[in-house]
Image: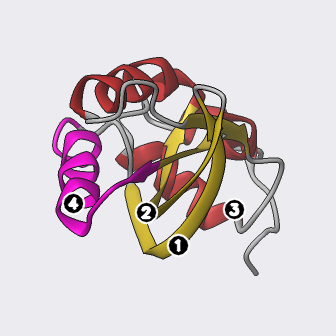
């Protein structure tokens, strides 16, 4: 029976960013997936964003990118998004995953370039 959590839960994070077009979102996803900095990138959109920028209330149509990766890859993933992003100050957030389906969390860790998990699994 699958477990709700695994050893990998402490290692998995979600990185979120936004893009101004579907093409930009696809480019950001590729920048994370090709070098295996993320196991998966979901693109959701369009979404309407409202935000303050340089003292003015702004509105934009954006595409939300949600990447699944590991704490070990988080810094490199943030750097890759920043390098590939068109915005001057891109939204890039990393959020810890506190639990989930154990097999999925293990998959994220394995596909994000993390080391072999076998030696860290619970008996």
On residue 112, which mark appears?
none
User: In the rendered structure, are the residues bearing label 2 and label 1 in contact, judged by CB atoms less than 8 Å apart?
Assistant: yes
On residue 62, which mark appears?
2
Q: CA distance from mark 4 to mark 2?
A: 12 Å
The mark nearer the N terminus, 1 or 3, is 1
Mark 4 neighbour density, 10 Å: few (under 14) some (14–19) many (20 or more): some
Q: Residue at x 18, y 51 (%)?
A: 27
What secondary structure predominates along the stretch shown in magenta?
helix
Q: Which residues are magenta?
A: 18-35
Q: Nearer the viewer, mark 4 or mark 3?
A: 4
* On screen, residue 103 above or below 7: below
Q: Nearer the viewer, mark 3 or mark 2?
A: 2
Colour theme: secondary structure
The mark nearer the N terminus, 2 or 1, is 1
Instruction: Please give the residue where the numbered disc 1 appears in the rendered image.
Output: 47
Mark 2 neighbour density, 10 Å: few (under 14) some (14–19) many (20 or more): many
Q: Residue 38: horizontal and vertical position, in percent?
A: 38, 45
Image-based side of 80 in relation to 73, left or right? left
Q: Residue at x 36, y 19 (%)?
A: 79
Q: Residue at x 17, y 62 (%)?
A: 23
Instruction: Please give the residue where the numbered disc 4 appears in the rendered image.
Output: 26
Helix, strand or loop status at disc 1? strand
Q: Residue 115: horizontal and vertical position, in percent?
A: 42, 29
Q: CA distance from mark 1 to mark 3?
A: 30 Å
Image-based side of 118 in relation to 65, left or right? right
Tell which residue pokes out farthest to the bottom in this image. 1
Mark 1 neighbour density, 10 Å: few (under 14) some (14–19) many (20 or more): few
Image-based side of 118 in relation to 19, left or right? right
Q: Quadrant of the N terminus?
A: bottom right
The mark nearer the N terminus, 3 or 2, is 2
């Amino acid at each position: 029976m699958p477990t709700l959590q695994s050893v990998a839960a402490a290692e998995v994070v979600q990185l979120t960013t936004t893009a101004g077009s579907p093409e930009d979102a696809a480019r950001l996803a590729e920048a994370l997936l090709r070098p295996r900095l993320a196991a998966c990138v979901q693109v959701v959109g369009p979404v309407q964003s409202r935000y303050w920028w340089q003292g003015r209330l702004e509105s934009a149509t954006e595409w939300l990118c949600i990447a699944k990766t590991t704490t070990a890859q988080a810094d490199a993933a943030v750097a890759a998004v920043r390098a590939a992003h068109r915005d001057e100050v891109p939204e890039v957030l990393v959020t810890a995953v506190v639990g989930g389906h154990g097999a999925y969390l293990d998959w994220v860790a394995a596909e994000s370039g993390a080391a072999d998990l076998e030696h860290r699994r619970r008996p």
